[in-house]
Amino acid sequence: MNRQTIIVLPIKSVILIWIMLLCLIGPAGLSHLKAAETPGTTANPEQEKWKAGISTTVITPEQSMWMAGYAARTKPSEGKVHDLHAKALALEACPERSRGDEQGTRLVIVTVDLLGIPRPLRDWLEKQVNQRYKLPPESLLLNASHTHCGPVVKEMEDSIYGDSFYGLSPEQIQRSRQYMKTLQKKLLSLVGQAIENLAPVRLGYTHARAGFAMNRRLKTERGYVISANPDGPVDHDVPVLRIDNPDGKLRAVVFGYACHNTTLSFYKFCGDYAGFAQIYLEEAHPGVTAFFVAGCGGDQNPYPRGTLDLAQQHGRALANGVEAALLWRASPIQGPIRVVLETVTLDFAKPPGRQQLQQQAQSSDKYERRHAEVLLKELEQTGKIRTEYPYLVQVIQFGDDLTMVALSGEVVVDYSLRLKAELAGPTVWVAGYSNDVFGYLPSLRVLQEGGYEGGGAMRYTNLPGPFAPSVEKRVIDKVHELVNKVRAAKSK
Ligand SMILES: [Zn+2]
């Protein structure tokens, strides 16, 4: 009896407490939901000091082409899953008349569903946009999604590496060069259209997470191999820049993720998970353009991988990450905008001598053989093998609110984790695969551990071999120098 009373009373009190709690939470909960349903940046007229222009174009090859990313492919492409795109976002912070600016500083971000940005393409485009649209080189950011299901664009006439890597037929080489010419024209007019379309907007930053990227460097008795390593470092952040029309309607989203875009390795053109994520976001928000900016995913893979269904699942997971970020009110981003692009010289470790190269040129491994042949050719033509790499670092400062660091090459995750920890102040967004995708940028740890990203992958490039141990310090010091520069310029 007594026992029963003890049981009954708490249940009654629990129900009572619940009713009271519901009454208390109710209105707050509803208003909270309402806020989540009508997100966007706050309607502060101060923020409407931005202009944005958007343009997109399809860059899917019109005919079958050799596909970039895997040396082991044995035939050219066979159709497509969906189109590959190039997209441009022009941003302009309204002029600071007090500084005598006639037009505000501009930034144009160009994203492409391609394996990389060859340096000659970057050099050509930056020169052209400067001449035609008065866009200075530091205001142009190019980023490649690193899909391994796009065409080969590296085989340019001025490439030292020539056409040996994929072993293309003369016909395929011709197609690749023709594609590059068409791509150049498309990118040039894309940038022009985006600048022409500049119209008032508001900018906001928000972020969420997605979990499918996993470290892909596994320590084994044979050294580090490419295999899922659940204990290795990852960066699951999904940074999101939202661009809203003055009426608060979403106009565009720029989102990042640090993971190789390599769920797939088949023979159809496809943007892989990053392509699907952009498609899903654009389907869910008609009229909105979604831009994917590849992060520091050099040593990250999407797991599990290997099927179209998995590429769609990872695309959905990333799109959901962006949708989650869009649920909350974004932090408004103010101007002005400050941009800087500089080169830092990276040293290579001592290259192999002529004798060693001649030996390697007899190797039964065709990639080792080709790499040695390329270096021997360089030795013959120039009398030496290059010892340095001119590495591009770009930094963009949005008011006091956001610092974007765009690094070239296939950057390993240590860089984004370190820079986000070290750079105090505004939110930091670190992109990889920007402006010049020449090969891997290892951290000192990855360089010392060795393996594919540490230096092994260099044999698939025209570069001599691993970087010297100074690589990480040189890049990090340059980023700090440039961040200090843009932040100091802003506060002047
Ligand atoms: Zn890669």
Image (spheres, rainbow, N blue to C red):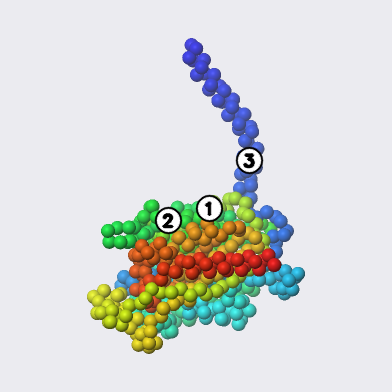
Q: Residues within 10 Å of mark 3 (few under 14, many from 20)?
A: few
Label 1 amino acid? Ala
CA distance separating discs 2 and 3: 39 Å
Which residue in the rendered view is the most extreme toward the top? 1
Query: Relative to residue 396, is residue 474 drawn left or right?
Result: left
Q: Is residue 222 in sight in this rendering?
A: yes
- 45 with respect to 238 (left or right): right
Q: Which residue is drawn at 73% across and 58% down?
A: 45
Residue appearing at x 25%, y 76% in the figure: 363
Tell me which amino acid carries mark 3.
Answer: Leu
Along the viewing direction, whichever of 120 and 22 lies nearer the viewer: 120
Residue matched to label 1: 208
Left-right relation of 308 to 14: left
SS for tag 2? loop
Q: Position of residue 69 (x, y in %)?
A: 38, 70
Give the residue number, with chain letter if any, for mark 3: 30
Position above or below: 96 against 219:
below
Q: Residue 233 carries which label?
A: 2
